[in-house]
Amino acid sequence: MLRARLSDRVNLIIETGGAAKWQNNVVSASTNQIYKVTDGGLQCLVPKLGSKPMTDPNTLSEFIRYCKQNYPADRYELILWDHGGGSTGGYGYDMNYPNSGSMTLDKIERALDDGSCTFDFIGFDACLMATLETGLTLEEYADYMIASEENEPGSGWYYTDWLNAVSENTSLSTPEIGKIIADTFVDKTPQGQTTLSVIDLAQIKEASEGRLADFAKSVSKLIKDGDYATVSNARSGVREFAQSVHIDQVDLIDLANRMGTMEGEDLAKALKTGVVYNRTGRGMNNSQGISIYFPYANPSKVGGMISTYDKIDMDEEYSECIRTFASLQLGGQMAAGGQSGSLTDLLGQLMGSGAQIQQPGGSGAIGSLLSSLLGGGDLSMLSGFTSGMDTGWIDGKMITDSADYYAKNMLDEEALIFTENRDGDRVLSLEEDQWELVQNVELSVFMDDGDGYIDLGMDNSASFDDDGNLIAEYDGTWLSIDGQAVSYYMISAESHGDGEYTIRGRVPAMLNGELVNLILEFTDDNPYGSVLGAQPDYGGSADTVAKGLIELQDGDRIDFLCDYYTYDGEYIDSYYLGEQYTVYGEPEIGSVTVDAGCKALFRLTDIYNNVYWTPTI
């Protein structure tokens, strides 16, 4: 911003706050302030606004009114800058007021309504805010929204060029401004997984009216007609954003097309007219400019989202759609025995004692189990649920009525054994209808240290023979950083065709005493990989995602972390793995042979997001 050659016809006003420490000697961390950017410097307009949460809607509305009163203009633009959590998390995280939470969509709407101003565009220089829900929230207050479907890098938007363009021509159309913002953001960002779209809010509203309801009804019909697997497979394969934090946000156009219905195709086609410009970096296939919440990894948020939808007047048919899908998914988790893939089950396989929890038999037994759990059983074993969490939205009747469907569409744990194929290799061989229930196969590696098991992480290292059998092999090595074995978890793997690919993963660590995930990337151009940086991990204390990565510097101290399981099932989440590592130069990613006590096994995930473990390899 400071490098821009601002015209005297352009006023750029900023309110600062929310940071415990600023990376300059100008802005105060003890009070909110208002600045004007002018002639390459910051002119302080209001030095002491008082310390108040930047996620309070009153803070935003007061700032809007201040700008409109003191700097009246023919055109207004509003940019919200920093953390974002999409439709479930909303905007913002105030380091000085961490308990104030984020500014949820209904609070954003309240702030805009109280601010009494209409904008050419409202932009989010923040993560994950390019959602249909956000767009419908803003539609009454702005013509366009400029936002990212994916996490944003720490550098954020590149302001210089588009501010120069506006200063040179204040009549520049909003789509033209948005195009410059998106192009410079993607072109000048060294990290490839970038997205930014310019969305016509009136067109998006028009596109969603009727069509979203029709699409939602068509999805609900698939589920109720016994075709839940089609919906689940579409959801599993869709472009998803911020996968590592399980906010269940997916590209809406991609999702609509994958459902294979006329209603989905109609919705996707209409939405594309509303996304007037969309730029993405490498590795972001099927990021088409607008996303939506659709539960899968963490259905416990469904109740809260239905409440949010009521507040922002989202179509009721879509609320019913996600309620239907999540209910049948949770029923599938109950039907699997209540806790398939649990810690007890995993430890049983590592100790060689087999599965600890047996699945019920036919539809009658499953129906009895479902009725028992829904009639007052403990549902805290379901994905993301804790004791006392709202479960009132769950459609219990539909779940019990689906007992026969579950009986016919459930992975058989007793079949998860290794046999020999015709070449003498140990393999997992399943019938075709059983493989159709499997959505993901991942390799998990655990190291026995004499007192328990160190979790070394999870990768997509799985191979199949010519007959489609999973080969039970593991070469005894694991990922390392400068020769130190680390816990590594793959986040995403994407093929771009012609041998091009992008794989990303995370390594949990403490960076100079702060909890982070080191983000690693492997590409066809750099198959040995590189450490892109460190993403702060707030450990569940924030609903939003930290923007960008912390660049590693020489002298940084890194303690690698791992999950640890004792033989009696106790979980310890603060176990240090290996020696403290000090950064000097570019960290070298490689592989090392791990201890002879290491055990590997495959983790299979089914259409209900149940987890199953094979015997150890």
Image (cartoon, rainbow, N blue to C red):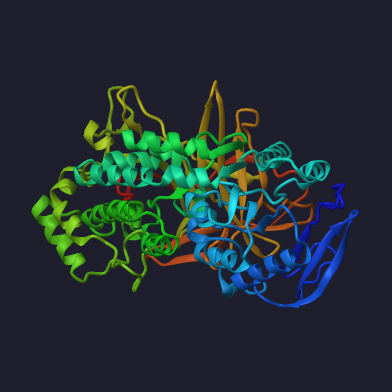
User: Horizontally, is 338 left or right of 240 in the view?
Assistant: left
Q: Position of residue 134 (x, y in %)?
A: 52, 54
Residue 9 location (% of width, % of height): 83, 51
Residue lying at the far left of the rendered structure:
364
In the image, farthest residue toward the bottom: 50
Looking at the image, the residue that sits furthest to the right is 39
Residue 320 in the image, given as x and y percentages of width and height = 30, 55
| Residue in the image at 80% along x and 62% along y | 23
Q: Residue at point 87% right, 47% down?
A: 5
**In the depicted structure, whether residue 107 falls above or below residue 608:** below
- Left or right of 280? Residue 300 is left
Residue 592 visible in the snapshot:
yes
Instruction: Answer with the quarter of the image where residue 270 lies.
Output: top left
Is residue 17 positioned above or below 207 on the image? below
Q: Quadrant of residue 591?
A: top right
In this view, the residue in front, 365 or 247, is: 247
Mark yes or no: residue 617 visible: no
Q: Nearest the camera: 615 or 443?
A: 443
Image quadrant containing the C terminus: top left
The residue at 38%/42% (across/down) is 236
**Residue 395 in the image: above or below residue 277:** below
**In the image, is 576 to the left or to the right of 292?**
right
In the figure, 100 relative to 542: above or below? Answer: below
Residue in front for this viewpoint, 79 or 378:
79
Where residue 235 appears, as percent x and y from the top left, is: 38, 43
* Residue depicted at 78% across the width and 49% down the height: 584
Count of marks overlaid on the render: 0
Name the image quarter holding residue 99: bottom right
